[in-house]
Image: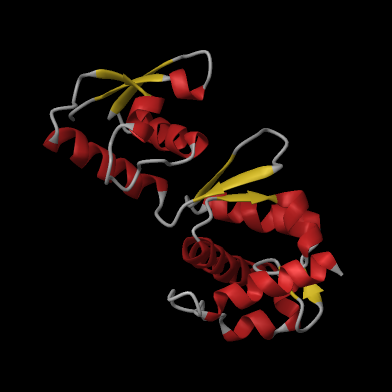
């Protein structure tokens, strides 16, 4: 009963009563086959594109950057289940969909076992461009800094407070493009980096 009540509160909280705009669930969210990974490749590819956009938009709307796969599979609520039609993805289905979100550049796995996924509303390359523009505007090129400094000391910037795994993935993408050099640390927050102008 408590879980059902909690789920109802979560769904009701999307109603807009708190002044926030209500999340508009797309029509396909009420379509039972949406919650079954489709066997035909072309159909599955289309389904995955829809899932990627839906997860990105939904997580952005609720302000959540993290998905615990096990918790998502047992909650039986949005975004991976629709209690109204009694349909939802299995834990493997959730992981499959999140792997597609990762491939699309909107997410990274926080761990090797793929238990937690970090989600963002912008692609990693978009964040890379934002961080590089910030570095140019603020004289931060060719300066060694830590990941923790970048995510905690830049008030008002879109990347402030970004999950460490996500920011690390952005910096790795920048390194791959020759725009950053990374220096190992004892943990992600201590990871050093230098932003480069190309």
Answer above or below: position of 14 versus 139. below
Residue drawn at the location 39% of the way across and 54% of the way down:
122
Q: Position of residue 12 (x, y in %)?
A: 62, 77
Which colour assignment does the render follow?
Answer: secondary structure
- Judge from the rendering whether residue 7 lies leftward or rightward of residue 172; answer left or right: right
The image shows residue 86, relative to residue 40, as above or below, that is below
Q: Looking at the picture, how far across and down is residue 193, in whole percent?
A: 34, 21
Q: Is residue 123 above or below residue 23?
A: above
Position of residue 93 in the picture relative to residue 156 (left or right): right
Tell me the quarter of the image containing the N terminus. Answer: bottom right
Instruction: For the C terminus, give its image quadrant.
Output: top left
Residue at 68%, 33% (x, y): give it. Answer: 112
The image shows residue 50 at horizontal and vertical percentages of 56, 71
Answer whether residue 37 is visible to the viewer in this image: no
Q: How many marks?
A: 0
Q: Is residue 181 visible?
A: yes
* Residue found at the far right of this picture: 1
Is 21 left or right of 44, judged from the image as shown? left
* Rendered residue at 41%/51% (across/down): 123
Q: Position of residue 67 (x, y in %)?
A: 63, 51
Q: Is residue 180 left or right of residue 63?
A: left
Front position in the image: 126 or 135: 135
Please tell me which residue is depicted at 70% across the width and 66% down the height of the picture.
80
């Amino acid at each position: 009963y408590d879980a059902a009540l909690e789920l109802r509160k979560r769904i009701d909280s999307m109603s807009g009563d708190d002044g926030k705009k209500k999340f508009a669930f797309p029509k396909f969210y009420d379509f039972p086959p949406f919650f079954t990974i489709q066997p035909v490749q072309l159909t599955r590819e289309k389904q995955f594109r829809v899932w990627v956009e839906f997860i990105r938009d939904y997580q952005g709307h609720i302000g959540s950057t993290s998905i615990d796969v096990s918790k998502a599979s047992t909650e039986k609520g949005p975004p991976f289940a629709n209690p109204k039609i009694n349909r939802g993805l299995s834990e493997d289905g959730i992981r499959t969909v999140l792997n597609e979100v990762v491939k699309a550049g909107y997410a990274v796995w926080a761990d090797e076992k793929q238990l937690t996924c970090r989600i963002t509303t912008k692609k990693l390359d978009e964040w890379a461009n934002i961080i590089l523009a910030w570095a140019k505007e603020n004289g931060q090129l060719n300066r060694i800094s830590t990941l923790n400094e970048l995510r905690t000391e830049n008030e008002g910037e879109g990347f402030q407070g970004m999950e460490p795994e996500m920011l690390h993935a952005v910096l790795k993408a920048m390194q791959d493009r020759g725009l950053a050099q990374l220096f190992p640390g004892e943990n992600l927050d201590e990871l050093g980096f230098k932003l480069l102008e190309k």
